[in-house]
Image (tube, rainbow, N blue to C red):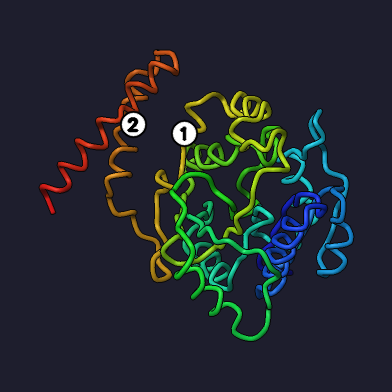
Amino acid sequence: MTFLTLFSAPKPFTNPHIAIIQRNAIKSWTLLPDVEVILLGEEEGLAEAAQELGVKHIPHVTRNASGTPLISSMFQLARENANSDLLCIVNADMILLPDFVEAARRSRLQRDTFVLLSQRWDLDIAQPVEFTEGWQDRLSSTVHRQGQLHRPAGSDFFLFPKSCYPDIPNFTIGRAGWDNWMIYKARSEGWAVIDGTPSLMIVHQNHDYSHLPGGKTHYDHPDTNINIRLAGGHAHIRYTILDSTHCLVDGKLARPQMTSLRLMRKIELFLRAVFFFLPENMLESIARPKRWKKRIQKILNRKS
């Protein structure tokens, strides 16, 4: 029995750059200790890539009317075929380092029900990574010199025990909303939402959005509106890493430090709870006025 199962639904391997970064990512997963990898879908080139990289491939994933895999089907197939008690859905452009598994171990030792996530580092990578001795240190050094820590919005992986998320709506992968719902669901169930940013580095290989209609981001795709509806509305897709209940620091769970962004988020949630009866557009203007940021920053500057 392995410790952790990673599962993902990669894009087609037809775009040369997408093919490179996906192979980079999946190869990094195979080098993690005590981890198995499951690739889901029938995208062009996926079966060949799975065989080349020595990972499990399951082609038959339920799709929406546009042919895009559904998150619910991905979770079900992962549960049925995983040889571990921990599962992790991860985007196929993310390079993972050994500290990823250590963060998972530390989280599992301290909580029975939890979801682990973190901010990513964005980096331009256009060539195959050379996975020779010392590649982790070389990549980490490059990330610190040239990469950028992504803002705490959007999540590229969710790691959780099998007992969590038994029922997933029919979200469409690669569209907005479902990842925010994952955090909302964990919070509503009382699970620990663990921000692993201080303890691990995940590397997002930058790419364009030519695989989406019109080359627009997933926020502008019609399937995003369906995801929002399935999530229960806008209120359930506002959740981000700022809503984590714990941080993983030096192998131990601690409460997140209060920052201006976290304070703004707490105020927003309070206002949304108080004015829950108002339409979303009015709630947005009340809960997220631009003046809050300036006012809170002034308060914090006075204290510092």
Side of 249 where 296 appears, left or right: left
Badge number at residue 228: none
Which label was assigned to residue 268?
A: 2
Image quadrant where one finds the C terminus = bottom left
Q: Residues within 10 Å of mark 1 (few under 14, many from 20)?
A: some
- Please indicate whether residue 52 sits to the left or right of residue 25 in the image: right
Is residue 260 toward the left or the right of residue 113 in the image?
left
Residue 138, relative to residue 267: is it above or below? below
Residue 157 percent across, percent down from the top left: 59, 53
What quarter of the picture does the N terminus occupy?
bottom right
| Residue 51 placement: quadrant | bottom right
Q: Position of residue 109 (x, y in %)?
A: 51, 66
Q: Which amino acid is tagged 1?
A: Arg
83 above or below 287? below
Residue drawn at x 19%, y 35% is 295
Tell me, yes or no, whether the two marked residues, 1 and 2, touch with CB atoms within 8 Å: yes
At x 66% / y 68%, what residue is drawn? 3
Does label 1 or label 2 sit earlier along the sequence? 1
Give the residue furthest to the left: 302
Number of marks present in the image shown: 2
Residue 293 x/y as whole percent? 26, 37
Question: Image quadrant of residue 252?
Answer: bottom left
Characterize the local packing of mark 2: few (<14), some (14-19) or many (20 or more) Cα atoms within 10 angstroms: many
Picture quadrant of residue 56: bottom right
Q: Secondary structure at mark 2?
A: helix
Q: Residue at x 51, y 26 (%)?
A: 234
In the rendered image, residue 117, in percent from the top left (x then y), is placed at: 52, 54
Disc 1 target residue = 238
